[in-house]
Image (cartoon, helix red, strand yellow):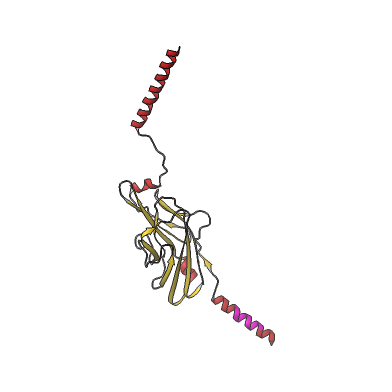
Amino acid sequence: MRFMRVTLASLALATTLAGTAAADNWAGNTVSTPYCGGNTFSTCVSIAMSWSNNTGTSTVVTLIMSNQSNDPGLKWFSVGLDNMPAGLTYSGSGALGFSDPGNGHSGGMFPPTVYAMGVNGGADPGYQVDRTFTFNFSSGTSQNWTTILNAAGVGLHAGGLNAADGSSCSTKLSVTSAGATTAPDGSKPACEALDTPTNVVPEPAAMLLLATGLVAMCGVGFIRRRHKA
């Protein structure tokens, strides 16, 4: 009889623990190579996302994104999750502050539905800086959050740089759990020079001036040698 009571208690505990599963990780979390968006003007990030429970009426998502782009002045405007079910409610906090639905994180290449946070005017990410965002999702009915979140994309809108002709340059990217990246350039050709390595190619006039100077120096050296002789 005692054995049965212990067995039933163990089963009850196992059932309780199963109902409150441990944290789960996003299948698209970056292992080594960061995700990049854009063409020659690009933004690269590493992603680490997890959530507190697999099923239920609510879950807390922790999204950590590490900036991998070393563009001086680059700003992040919004971070969010797309391709999510409609009808969820959410709140959150993060390195950009919370703004619903996030500045510049809707429409275009972002699959609906989007839940995002951002800040007007953007925030300077620095370089190799981890930024943490917390999303608190809730629903009127029980949800399989693992299925929902592994089907979601992680999106970023970054920019705030100006090209030489005054063009405002930005990049949007959305990464799926399978590692697929959707990221049109979305900027003008002048913006591409911002990500081009600075290899200065001398202009023809500068080359001619340099050559003339060298010839003149050689001539002076030759004349001095003749005088000494």
Of the 4 image quadrants, the one containing the N terminus is: bottom right
Residue 79, located in which quarter of the rendered image? Answer: bottom left
Residue 44, located in which quarter of the rendered image? Answer: bottom left
Residue sitting nearer the eye, 47 or 200: 200
User: From this viewpoint, which residue is outermost toward the bottom?
Assistant: 1
Residue sitting nearer the eye, 67 or 186: 67
Residue 125 part of the magenta-drawn span = no
Residue sitting nearer the eye, 54 or 65: 65
User: From this viewpoint, which residue is outermost toward the front?
Assistant: 228
| Number of numbered markers | 0
Residue at image location 35% in from the left, 28% down from the top = 209
Q: Give x and y (percent) for residue 9.
A: 63, 82
Q: Give x and y (percent) for residue 214.
A: 40, 25
Residue at image location 48% in from the left, 66% down from the top = 62
Residue at image location 36% in from the left, 25% down from the top = 212
Q: Give x and y (percent) for residue 29.
A: 50, 60
Up-down relation of residue 189 to residue 30 (above or below): above
Magenta stretch? 6-13
Residue 12 part of the magenta-drawn span = yes
**Magenta portion: prevailing SS class:** helix
Up-down relation of residue 113 to residue 208 (above or below): below
Up-down relation of residue 207 to residue 13 (above or below): above
Left or right of 212? Residue 65 is right
